[in-house]
Image (spheres, rainbow, N blue to C red):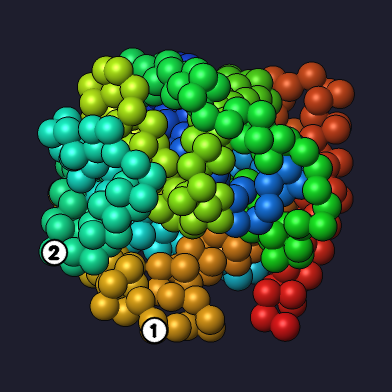
Amino acid sequence: MSENSQVGVGSPDAQVSSKRGIHGTWPSRWTFVLAATGSAVGLGNIWKFPYIVGENGGGAFVLVYLVCILVVGMPIMVAEIMLGRRGRHSPINTMRYLTKEAGLHGGWNAIGWLGVTAGLMILSYYAVIAGWALHYIGHMASGTFQGVSAEQAGIIFGDLLADTNTLIFWQSVFLLLTMGVVMGGVTKGLGVAVRVLMPLLFVLLLVLLVFGYQQGDFARGFSFLFSFNIEALTWKGVLIALGHAFFTLSLGMGAIMAYGAYMPDHARIGRTVIAVGFLDTLVALVAGLAIFPIVFANPTIAPSAGPGLMFVSLPVAFGNMSGGLLFGSIFFVLVTLAAWSSAISLIEPAVAYLVESKGFNRFTANLLLGFIVWLVGLGSVLSFNVWAEARIAGFNFFEFMDFLTSSVMLPLTGLFIAIFVGWIMKPQAVREEMNDEPSSVFFVWRWVVRYLSPLAVLVVFVMGIYKTFS
Ligand code: PHE
């Protein structure tokens, strides 16, 4: 049975006092791996990772990012899944149940609220960017980029950003697609789609990699990504790397906690997380290796071009290779699908909460949340044109939403999760949930979550914020 096929209504207290969730469980650990990978692999890997690497000087940033994935991201992913599976509800009610179970102050519920709010805020701009990808499918297919130069590709992209109505149209289409799936339930639709499409996405990225290798400046692209140039690294950059580790693994906002709530009882969490973390990192690195050789071969594209990087450099590649129009359209279809399987996990926690506690059904919950997200998203649409000069704390609206969520809310929620699991929850409860792990794995993980992850997040967060604003 799909985990979302039932609609449950009830008082929060009645709900949280039972350990069984109302949404059901994934049929197997693999379905969880697929769903979590679908959530993790998205615009963060293909669109965001390359451009933040470009903006933050390359190799040293990549190294810091990889360290953050290992030391902070994967251990906290284990913690989130574990919490979700123990609570078996939406992140908000899961945290309610767990704080109650441990006899703790209700303030710990903030973890759930912060996460759910961050998810909706991310979705507001995520839908705008995914809308660009949707728009590019048609452009690719109709030959707009045939034989295009980097300069022309830049102009075409600039024209899109200036066109408010088109941006709003595609943003709305993407949000409707997302709501449609979450209304119907996740496993059958997306679970199956992800299994077929993720491998295809990977193959196409490899095709682009080969193109970059043959036609681009591969050596420069490679050394930009992997040579360690410490001078290019700033505290702000380190904070962005940390925030991105959370973003790309879908952590600190309840998505993985919500998915963990649907996980079978005896599935080993550690292995699962290694699989998801590995696939996610691989897609990001291959995307970088596909994009930067093309960037360096075209002097009109700067590696620090920002959010438009992928939308300028890849069309140049596609427009100038044989079969590129076909590959190009397929590629943007896949980017859209990757974004789609992530977007559903951005809205699912809030939907699950409204269904559990507020008497909504999935349909109305999606309508309400979708509308709010759409409205907030208009701010991001306008920040690319009409409001381009408006500033909040030095950022435009889109940058502000991104900074606030990725660099502030996700790391903070992650920090609270590490502290909660490492220091607050009863050790037996933690061990019980992890009892399929060998004790050495459990020991190392618990140590990392108690000491290393919180310390790393704290230092990077404080220094990053301080340096960003000083
Ligand atoms: N991980 C997704 C990506 O990299 C984005 C995301 C963030 C999805 C947080 C869910 C939760 O694109």
The residue lying at 19 percent from left, 39 percent from top is 144
Against 97, residue 44 (above or below) is above
Instruction: Give the quarter of the image for residue 199.
Output: top left
In the rendered structure, the answer to whether residue 197 lies left or right of residue 20 reads left
List the residue tagged with mark 1: 390
Q: How crowded is mark 1: few (under 14 residues within 10 Å), some or many (20 or more)?
A: few
Dot 1: what SS? loop
Quarter containing the C terminus = bottom right
Q: Residue 316: horizontal and vertical position, in percent?
A: 36, 37
Q: Which of 375 and 26 is in front in this view?
A: 375
Dot 2: what SS? helix
Res. 405 in view: yes
Q: How crowded is mark 2: few (under 14 residues within 10 Å), some or many (20 or more)?
A: few
Q: Residue 152: horizontal and vertical position, in percent?
A: 30, 49
The residue lying at 29 percent from left, 23 percent from top is 324
Q: Using the numbered discs, state the Cα–Cα distance from disc 1 to disc 2 in whole angstroms.
A: 20 Å
List the residue tagged with mark 2: 165
Q: Residue 147: horizontal and vertical position, in percent?
A: 27, 33
In the rendered structure, the answer to whether residue 279 lies left or right of residue 63 reads left
The residue lying at 27 percent from left, 18 percent from top is 323
Answer yes or no: do the residues labelled 1 and 2 have beta carbons within 8 Å? Answer: no
Instruction: Give the quarter of the image for residue 1.
Output: top left
In the rendered structure, the answer to whether residue 228 lies left or right of residue 8 reads right
Against 233, residue 470 (above or below) is below
